Structures are given as structure tokens and as C-alpha cells.
Image (cartoon, grey):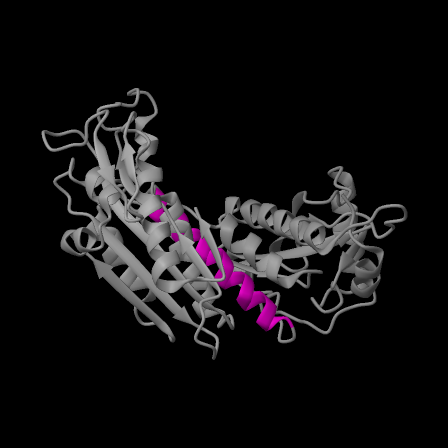
């Protein structure tokens, strides 16, 4: 893959962005720097306070290690002059003759390259990483934050460990970097929710987390409904699936009003089965541990709603997450049971492991009927 020639030219002409490099020996092992490498030239090196001799020395080190700046790749070198680790990240070739690279391609190159660079720097135990000028600042922020993600909340002794802090002091790219940070942290929220064990993330705990994450945001309202409300709404599918568990169902409804108009532009529905045994159509025991993530769709729409609100997107959006467990008990749904969905349609259940479509059917009908969005997406 190659970066657009016009993008390359703009970068190679130099940048006005800057960040400190730090020359204190005692801090050397804790600091890291990410620099782009395009057609064997360093991107934004002048603004990073690197003189010609230092640039050539870094390029010589890269060449000695066989690093050519291939798109998406990274190579860490140790700068004696700057007393810090520097990750050179490949942005491809400045000559894109015959290759049409769209913005999405450029952003993916940057996202991947910066992520690889940050991971390498973290392996060197740095605690602070500065990311230099990139052709796509938002993608650079996303790559940096996503690369630093780790889920160790339940590991003994890991609570005191910290990932490297990634910072950028670029003034003219601040808005783009901040947008990337918001998008990456939204993805990390979804990852946290999906990775959390089901005994800690029950339907009630999930709903409480949503209130915690979104309840204080501007133009956002979070409503959490329980079993009685679901019965009143005639959500036969959701009620049927949930009755097999001792954990009560929850129905989370999030409204974000970013536009001045009254209409809802987008509706989102996310599957929220916090653990799925398959019910009486029992899943095989092997890999059932992955079923704590059967609420990944719900996690995705919740994270998306937080990002939309933080970015102040000018759109009215509604998201709902039907939350329950699909378990086995004396009250659980049986194969061939018949229930009535919110739409009024009767459905015979021939496989209790098809619970997702049952709860999503009720949720989709609710959003379409009550909020009437211009577009509706289920995850």
C-alpha cells in the first residue's frame, strides 16, 4: 500500500506542529517518540527538533536494521543524541504513480503504523510516548490508544501496572487528535464490556455501567426499564428468553439529541445477552466461555452513543439494548414453545439458541414504532 503523492508532498514540505523530545538522562528510558518514515525520509523531523545530522543517523540505523519504511511497519531505534527510544513507522512511498489511494487507505496505514510503533515502545518500558505529525491525525490517535489497550482488571497484582501515556502537543491537529482519542476510547469501552465475566456483568450491572458512562453527557438521556415494563410493552420474546435466568432482564434506552429538529435520524439496536448457554438447545461446552461476549452488539451501540455525544454529532440518535441471560431452569423456554412478539406475530421456537433474533425483534419493533427513525441498524 502507498500513501497519496499529494499527501506525501505536503508532509515532506514540513509541518508547523511540534512536541518536546526531552534530553534528561534519568528520564531517557521512560520517553518514546513516534516518527513517520515516507520514501526513506522522516516526516516532520524538523518540527521534532531533529537536525540534519540526527535525521541521517536515524535513517542509517534503520537501514542497518533492514527497515525501509514499508507501509504499516515499525522499527524502534535508540537515539543517543536525544536519549530516548524512537519508533520509526512506515507510511509507504511518496511516489504513488498508478496507484489510487483513498483517504480510508491512508488512514488505515497511519493507524496500523502508529499502533505498531507504540506497541514496540511499550515493550521498551517507556511511560510517555509522543506521536509526531502524521498525514491523518485522527487515525494516529486511534492507533496509539487502541495499541495501549489491555484488560487486566481481574488479574491479581496487575492493578498497579500502567500503560504508557500517549500525548501530542500539536496545536493545529488538536481537534483531529481529540476526535481519534474519543473514537478509540469508545472502542476500548466496548472491549471492556465484552471482556468482563458474566458474573460481574449481569443485565443489571450492564445497565448501571451505561448510566455511569453516559448519564452525565450533554443532550443524553438514559432510561432503564425492567421486567414489568417489558410485559406492558408486550415484548414476548425478551420476556420468554429472560425467564430462564434468576437475573432480571433490563431494557436500556439511550436518547441523544444533537440536532435542532425533532425527528430521529438514526436508531440502533444492540444484542445484549450477557451470557448464552443456548438454553435447552444447549451449546457444546467447548468455547462456551466466549458466550460472555454475546452482548457485544449492545456494547458496540453503547460505545457508539458515547462517542456521538462526546463529538457533538449534529444528529438525533436513539439506541436500545435488550439485556438478559439465556439459561436453563424450570422456567426456561422449551423447544416448540410459542410466544407472541411485540408486533403481534406468533412465533414457534424450534431452537432456544436462536434467542438473539427473539429479543432483537421486540427491540427493533419498539424503536420503529415509538421513535420512528429515518434509518434503523441492529448489531
| Labels in figure, total | 0
The span shown in magenta is 173-194
| Main secondary structure type of the part rendered in magenta | helix
Viewer-proximal residue, 16 or 107? 107
Residue found farthest to the bottom: 260
Q: Give the x, y percent position of residue 357.
A: 35, 38
Does the magenta run of residues contain 177?
yes
Could you tell me residue 216's position as x and y percent? 31, 72
Q: Does residue 108 appear anywhere in the picture? A: yes
Looking at the image, residue 138 sits to the left or right of residue 50; the answer is left
The residue under the point 58% across, 72% down is 175
Identify the residue at image location x=27%, y=30%: 348
Front position in the image: 52 or 18: 18
Q: Position of residue 331 (x, y in %)?
A: 11, 33
Quadrant of image for the N terminus: top right
207 horizontally vs 164: left or right: left
- In the current view of this chain or complex, which residue is farthest to the left? 330
Let me know if residue 48 is in the magenta part.
no
Relative to 101, say whether 284 is above or below. Answer: above
Quarter location, residue 66: top right
Image quadrant in which you'd find residue 275: top left
- Whether 45 is drawn above or below 68: the answer is below
Left or right: residue 92 compared with residue 219? right
- At horizontal 32% and vertical 70% (from top left) the residue drawn is 221
- In the image, what residue occupies the spot 28% across and 21% down? 285
Question: Percent x, y for residue 293?
Answer: 35, 39
Name the residue nearer the viewer: 339 or 377.
339
For residue 26, say whether it is visible.
no
Amino acid at each position: 500500500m502507498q500513501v497519496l503523492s499529494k499527501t506525501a508532498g505536503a508532509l515532506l514540505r514540513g509541518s508547523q506542529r511540534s512536541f518536546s523530545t526531552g534530553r534528561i538522562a534519568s528520564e531517557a528510558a521512560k520517553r518514546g517518540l513516534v516518527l513517520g518514515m515516507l520514501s526513506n525520509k522522516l516526516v516532520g523531523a524538523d518540527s521534532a527538533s531533529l537536525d540534519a545530522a540526527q535525521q541521517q543517523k536515524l535513517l542509517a540505523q534503520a537501514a542497518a536494521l533492514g527497515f525501509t519504511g514499508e507501509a504499516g511497519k515499525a522499527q524502534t531505534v535508540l537515539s543517543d543524541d536525544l536519549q530516548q527510544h524512537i519508533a520509526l513507522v512506515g507510511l509507504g512511498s511518496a511516489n504513488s504513480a498508478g496507484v489510487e489511494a483513498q483517504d480510508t487507505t491512508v488512514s488505515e496505514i497511519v493507524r496500523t503504523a502508529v499502533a505498531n510503533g507504540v506497541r514496540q515502545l511499550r515493550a521498551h518500558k517507556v511511560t510517555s510516548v509522543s506521536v509526531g505529525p502524521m498525514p491523518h491525525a485522527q487515525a494516529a490517535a486511534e492507533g496509539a490508544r487502541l495499541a495501549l489497550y489491555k484488560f487486566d482488571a481481574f488479574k491479581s497484582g496487575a492493578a498497579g501496572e500502567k500503560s504508557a501515556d500517549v500525548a501530542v502537543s500539536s496545536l493545529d491537529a488538536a481537534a483531529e487528535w481529540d476526535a481519534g482519542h474519543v473514537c478509540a476510547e469508545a472502542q476500548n469501552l466496548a472491549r471492556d464490556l465484552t471482556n468482563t465475566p458474566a458474573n460481574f456483568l449481569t443485565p443489571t450491572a450492564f445497565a448501571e455501567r451505561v448510566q455511569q458512562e453516559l448519564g452525565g453527557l450533554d443532550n443524553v438521556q438514559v432510561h432503564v426499564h425492567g421486567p414489568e415494563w417489558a410485559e406492558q410493552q408486550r415484548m414476548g420474546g425478551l420476556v420468554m428468553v429472560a425467564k430462564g435466568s434468576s437475573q432480571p432482564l433490563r431494557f436500556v434506552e439511550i436518547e441523544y439529541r444533537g440536532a435542532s429538529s425533532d425527528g430521529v435520524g438514526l436508531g440502533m439496536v444492540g444484542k445484549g445477552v450477557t451470557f448464552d448457554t443456548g438454553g435447552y438447545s444447549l451449546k457444546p461446552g467447548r468455547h462456551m466461555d466466549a458466550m460472555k461476549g454475546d452482548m457485544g452488539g449492545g456494547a458496540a451501540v453503547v460505545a457508539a452513543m458515547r462517542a456521538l455525544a462526546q463529538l457533538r454529532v449534529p444528529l438525533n440518535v436513539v439506541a436500545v439494548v435488550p439485556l438478559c441471560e439465556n439459561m436453563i431452569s424450570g422456567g426456561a423456554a422449551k423447544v416448540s414453545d410459542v410466544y407472541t412478539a411485540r408486533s403481534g406475530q406468533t412465533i414457534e421456537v424450534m431452537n432456544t439458541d436462536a434467542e438473539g433474533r427473539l429479543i432483537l425483534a421486540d427491540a427493533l419493533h419498539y424503536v420503529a414504532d415509538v421513535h420512528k427513525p429515518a434509518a434503523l441498524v441492529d448489531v
